[in-house]
Image (tube, helix red, strand yellow):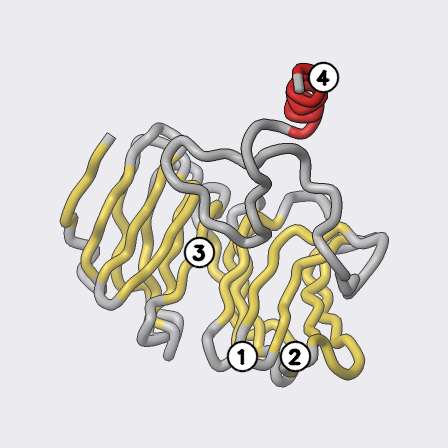
Amino acid sequence: MLRLCFLGIVISALVGCGHPLARGTLLGPGLRANGPVIDLGKRKVIARNTLAYQLAVTEKLLVSVELATHFELVLRSLSEHGPQGKERRIFVDQPTYDILDLAVTRDGHSAFLASAAGWVRGYDLEQGKLAQEWRMGSAVTALAISEDQNYLVIGTERGTLCLRRLRDGAQLQCMIAHQGRIGSLATHGQLVASGSWTGELGLWSLPSLRKRSLRT
């Protein structure tokens, strides 16, 4: 009996205490996986030897920003069985400055890229060409499209938050929202949330960009 207990202690030390959690189990407070994950099952590789900077998915399209000798928008059609058909590629730019974010409209008709060079470019994905370009005062670090698909929200490294109307590209609002780089943006209904590298979280109204909350 003592030998069996000792063997159990050795095994526990090697693989972790307690029973292993089933794959996909939510970890509650204080819980952690018992031992390393060895096999995640079968995986389908879409592309190899590719530097993928940004990704976005719509109902019928997988859009990625990839770098080979230059930056490209790569479009892959999707079905319930995964990627289908040939890839479509749109030239974006030389790799002088990074592409920092990607936003795609829900219908998959348009994509918007944010560059460390300080521009936002909008692409017509159906025609495969550049449709719009806007210059900002500093590197563009985050993008988000409103749920109603009417507005593009733009964040910069200087903490500037701007709003453009997608129908005609008109700039409606622009303000200093944070003291430093805006790292992420998300929209829900008539709200936009922003997170900065200075440790602030902001909540703003659309389309006025009126401050609802700002926490540090």
Residue 3 got which mark? 4
Q: CA distance from mark 2 to mark 3?
A: 23 Å
Discs 1, 2 touching: Cβ within 8 Å: yes
Discs 1, 3 touching: Cβ within 8 Å: no
Amino acid at the residue labelled 4: Arg
Measured as percent of width and height from the top left, residue 17 is found at 57, 28
In front: 13, or 156? 13
The quarter of the picture where residue 137 lies is top left
Residue 78 got which mark? 2
Q: Crowding at label 2, few (<14), some or many (≥20) Cα neighbours within 10 Å?
A: some
- SS at circle 4: helix
Amino acid at the residue labelled 3: Leu
- SS at circle 1: loop
Instruction: Report the mark closest to the observer, 1 or 4.
Output: 4
Residue 143 got which mark? 3
Task: Name the residue: 45% across, 49% down.
Answer: 26
Q: Crowding at label 4, few (<14), some or many (≥20) Cα neighbours within 10 Å?
A: few
In front: 208, or 45? 45
Measured as percent of width and height from the top left, residue 95 is found at 73, 47
